[in-house]
Amino acid sequence: MSTSDAARKTLAQRIAVAVVGIPIVVAMVVLGGWAWAGFVALVALGGAWEYRALAARKGVRVQPGGISLLAVAPPILAAAWMDYFAVLGAVVLVGVLLVWTLELARGPEMALLSTAATLAGALYVGAPLGTLVALRVWEHGGVADGIPGATVLVLLAVIWLADTAAYAVGRRWGRRPLAPRSSPKKTWEGAVACWSTATLVFPLLGSLVFTEIGLWELLGVGALIGVVMQLGDLAESQLKRDAGVKDSSALLPGHGGILDRVDSLLFAAPVLWGWLALRGGVL
């Protein structure tokens, strides 16, 4: 198969997965409650196991039980308690004790590295995804009536559109490598397209949802999301590069694995939630 044929096949797969997957995600967001929390928990579990597989390629033994429980806990607990900071703190405290207890049964070999990798992987995946549930449980006072899950839907739309812009511009006009050591195919042209799209789309959609917040503030948040989502992408690329793989898994044809799909969200969702928390709407 030629390079062009392979590229067309990959693009067709990406479109097919998106056509099927996006309506499912939107439906879960609209349903909210335990349906959304359970869906996010499954995503977190899948991402945690992909992280475990990446670590295994480096010879690091991540605890399967520890990383599974700690990755799933934040989304589930976020659905039950509004004070997500307090919940996360409790999860971290209990998680450290749990992981160390489990490590005692495995012996001293690589105990320090195993414990660190298990906790890091669980926090990398579970804690940020938990903020997606927290955003859905709590809706800002200015959210327009009749749009369930509007806050999460705006964030997802911004990331999907910005990712699409980065992909399209990068493939067509990308010339200058952005981070050649971590992700050789990413370019500055694609990065600018991603940032510009996020900066413009967030206030455009956000003005319909956050009706009490000014345009300049929404522009600033959009610009920030446009930066951090790309940092999340590059961070996951760094992990894959270190493990010597192209994708975190082959679960989603044309897209890679779960971590490949949520890498931007892992950084963007906590930023959005933190911004709203600082404005006094959450805490």
Image (cartoon, rainbow, N blue to C red):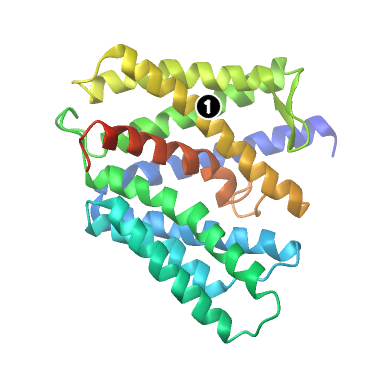
- SS label for mark 1: helix
- Quadrant where the N terminus is found in the figure: top right
Residue corresponding to mark 1: 227
Give residue 86's position: percent from left, percent from top.
29, 56
Residue at the spot x=66%, y=63% of the render? 53
Give residue 167's position: percent from left, percent from top.
63, 26
Number of numbered discs overlaid on the protein picture: 1
| Nearest to the observer: residue 33 or residue 225 | 225
**Corner quadrant of residue 75:** bottom left
| Nearest to the observer: residue 103 or residue 133 | 103
Residue at the spot x=39%, y=45% of the render? 25
Dot 1, how many residues are within 10 Å of its Cα: few (below 14), some (14-19), or many (20+)? many
Residue at the far top: name it: 216
Give residue 8's position: percent from left, percent from top.
71, 32
Residue 204 vs 140, above or below: the answer is above
Residue 234 vs 118, above or below: the answer is above
Residue at the spot x=60%, y=51% of the render? 257
With 188 as the anchor, is 149 left or right in this view?
Answer: left
Residue 2 vs 207, above or below: the answer is below
Q: Is residue 38 among what the camera can see? A: no
Residue at the far right: name it: 2
- Quadrant where the C terminus is found in the figure: top left
Q: Is residue 190 among what the camera can see? A: yes
Task: Give the amino acid type for the residue marked by disc 1 in the picture.
Answer: Val
With 251 as the anchor, is 67 left or right in this view?
Answer: left
Give residue 147's position: percent from left, percent from top.
21, 33
Residue 63 vs 126, above or below: the answer is below
With 20 as the anchor, is 240 left or right in this view?
Answer: right
